Amino acid sequence: MTYVDKLIELTALQTTNTLEKLDYKSNFASVIIINILLIFILNSYHFHLFRSVYW
């Protein structure tokens, strides 16, 4: 479990918890979309980090 993986997990949980307090059913799609976006953003960041370290 890397730092980035942990960050994704915690952010996803926080997003889910926040939206759950508002109204879970109506925000379920939003949770999925936000999590997908976060994963894409962090993966691209991690990829650039990886490239800068190894190339």
Image (cartoon, rainbow, N blue to C red):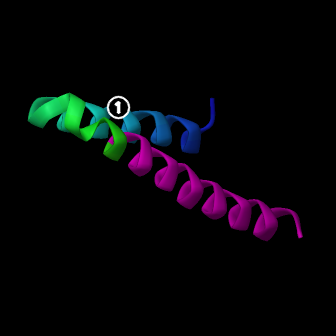
In the image, what residue occupies the spot 65% across and 62% down?
Answer: 44
- The residue sitting at the left extreme is 22
Is residue 39 left or right of 32 when viewed as pictured?
A: right
User: Quadrant of the rendered structure where residue 19 is?
Assistant: top left
Identify the secondary structure beneath mark 1: helix
In the image, what residue occupies the spot 48% across and 41% down?
Answer: 8
Query: Which percent across, then down, holds residue 20?
Result: 19, 30
Is residue 43 left or right of 19 when viewed as pictured?
A: right
Query: Which percent across, then down, holds residue 45?
Result: 61, 63
Query: Which percent across, then down, holds residue 52?
Result: 77, 70
Residue that mark 1 sits on: 13
Q: Nearer the viewer, residue 50 or 27?
A: 27
User: Quadrant of the rendered structure where residue 49 is?
Assistant: bottom right
The residue type indicated by label 1 comes to Leu
In the image, what residue occupies the spot 46% across and 34% down?
Answer: 9
User: Quadrant of the rendered structure where residue 43 is?
Assistant: bottom right
Q: Give the range drawn in magenta.
A: 31-55
Examine the structure image and report whether residue 10 is included in the region drawn in magenta.
no
Is residue 32 left or right of 1 when viewed as pictured?
A: left
Quick check: 34 above or below 22?
below
Please identify the quadrant where the N terminus is shown: top right
